[in-house]
Amino acid sequence: MAYIAGVDIGNNSTEVAIAELNRGSQPRFLSSAMVRTVGIKGTLRNILGIIDALDLALEPLTITRKELSRVLLNEATPVIGDVAMETITETVITESAMIGHNPSTPGGLGLGLGTTILLDELESAATEQPWIVVIPGTVEFREAAERLNRATSRELEIAGAIVQKDDGVLIHNRLHRPIPIVDEVLHIDRVPRQMPAAIEVAAIGKAIEKLSNPYDIATLFDLSPDETRNVVPIARALTGTRSAVVIKTPRGDIQERRIPAGKITLIGRQQKAEVQVEAGAEAIMNQLAHVSPLSEIQAEPGTNVGGMFETVRKVMADLTDQPVSAIRVQDIIAVDTLVPQKVLGSLAGEYSLGNAVGLAAMVETHKLPMQRLARKLEIEIMVPVEVAGVEAEMAIHGALTTPGTRPPLAILDLGGGSTDASLIKETGAIESTHLAGAGDMVTLLIDKELGLDDLDLAENIKFFPLAKVETLFHLRHESGAVEFFQEPLDPRLFGRVVVISENGPKPLDTREPLAKIIEVRKKAKKKVFVQNALRALVSVAPANSIRLISFVALVGGSALDFEIPQMISDALMEYGVVTGRANVRGVEGPRNAVATGLVLAHAAKESG
Ligand code: ADP
Ligand code: MG
């Protein structure tokens, strides 16, 4: 009798399966465990996580680490499946001052046009022209209102006000003559003085109309057609906000600087193609399919995409102790997105939604780091360690323990860094592939598209369904279902969009409406996983025809997602493919396929 452990080191998780081997009979699985992978897959830091996972799996058993007769590691292919994504777009930097945001309490209503002036300077101001008054945070609202009223009684025309604190309503309530007021302007000191400005506040629940339209801005400021083209990013940035200010800048027009998006060169084994990133995700992916099988992908230096490729290769070179020249990008996935871009000259941190192409790249290295890892681990735990089998092959052996499956079968391993597929034929022959882009890219897309800059929040949005807390005693789930509570919810949740996590509703720190967040989440999942599922299956299918595959089992962490399996299943239905989530050994769900496969393959080999 012997105890063996199968260990699968992934980009995200390290999974273990422990089994008892008895000559002449099937292995008996005793326990399993999963921990977060420590360090990048294939590097020595992984050892910390492996030992943790082993101990966790051994804990309920009566055996110790030393009693294991063997530890089996997956043979990570020379592809290190970590994924980096950067938004690749033509960066337009405009110079002009604008404020556009949704303060919770703007004051007044309507449109005002005038020249900017500091509240302090109002006393000595001329009466011929309308003024837009800039009120710094040091001035208290009663005093501000009083001074504005005094100015009006001196026949000064006040067209609007820009306020630093959130006093818009308080000031407005005390004015004899109503004006539009934009408040919560953080960088009030950067508002240029003595410049023509327009201010607009919409009614509650509505968005501004004039300052979000380039032609209205042109009308207000008397712009030429060229100048009008240049205010487009401003108008776009202001679309959908409740209040806004546009200030004509000192230089009178807007400066532009462009960094080209750049082109990528796809080098296939038979042919080669170049494609401009600006052509969009579809064009890139079409070319990629056209030249595949791929041997390498290169990017034009000095461009956005060139910069991204260099970063990925350098990070990988550092982590694996190899020269940058040895690192080659071997697959990419491109996805069209809209990302908020900071507009230069914005005074309250506004952004404009720009078209972008998100790219995830997968890198190939030349050395198999697994052997090195195995030797080191062996010394640490004093148990023989063996690099035992190719990951994709092991995954399919593990998946085949799902009740109701048999070859021929294809699996999709939906991980964090890569989407892998393999196909086992009736003869036992296996085809497999690894593609860039999986769960991590979905998280990144959600983060970028919603402008969160908070990957944990983005991961939460990916993981859990949303709901809106409508009162302290009920919330409306995104499905429309209403849930009531006996006890009041935390008052801080009132009116908020929340994720329904295992620990109950958790508020999202974003101002985006529920519907928008759902749309971004679903699109990100679809763009990455449906596209990659199809790409991966085409590459392993007989004659590259998905129609010739009958059954697909999903494994890996992203197969646990509450909507990804359905999206893939719907897409594959068109090809007559039956798709389902694996249930490894009838108990693990889509988890533990590779670790289980390692044990099974070893047992099969032992028994001859
Ligand atoms: P790897 O093999 O690359 O280590 P995993 O198979 O562990 O990856 O999958 C990791 C991915 O699965 C991550 O992107 C993670 O967000 C996602 N994931 C894990 N559990 C869930 C879940 N319950 N719902 C949705 N996604 C999940
Ligand atoms: Mg995996």
Image: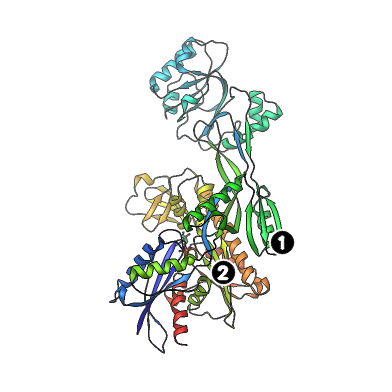
> Residue 372 placed where, x, y %?
44, 66
Residue 15 falls in which quadrant of the image? bottom left
For the point 66% across and 73% down, the residue is 547
Q: Is mark 2 within 8 Å of ligand 2?
A: no
> Residue 252 placed where, x, y %?
62, 23
Q: Secondary structure at mark 1?
A: loop
- All told, the count of numbered labels is 2
Q: Earlier in the sequence, mark 1 or mark 2?
A: 1
Q: Identify which residue, 161 or 447, lies in the foreground.
A: 447
Q: Which mark is residue 271?
A: 1
* Residue 348 versus residue 393 in the image, above or below: above
Q: Is residue 33 left or right of residue 331?
A: left
Looking at the image, can residue 140 be seen? yes
Q: Identify which residue, 35 or 412, lies in the foreground.
A: 35
Q: Which mark is residue 421?
A: 2
Q: Residues within 10 Å of mark 1 (few under 14, many from 20)?
A: few
Give the CA distance from mark 1 to mark 2. Answer: 24 Å
Q: Are marks 1 and 2 in contact (CB under 8 Å)?
A: no
* Residue 511 versus residue 234 in the image, above or below: below
Q: Type of residue at label 1?
A: Gln
For the point 69% across and 52% down, the residue is 275
Q: Type of residue at label 2?
A: Ala
Q: Nearer the viewer, mark 1 or mark 2?
A: 1
Q: Identify which residue, 484 or 296, lies in the foreground.
A: 296
Q: Is mark 1 within 8 Å of ligand 1?
A: no
Quadrant holding the N terminus = bottom left
* Residue 201 versus residue 416 in the image, above or below: above
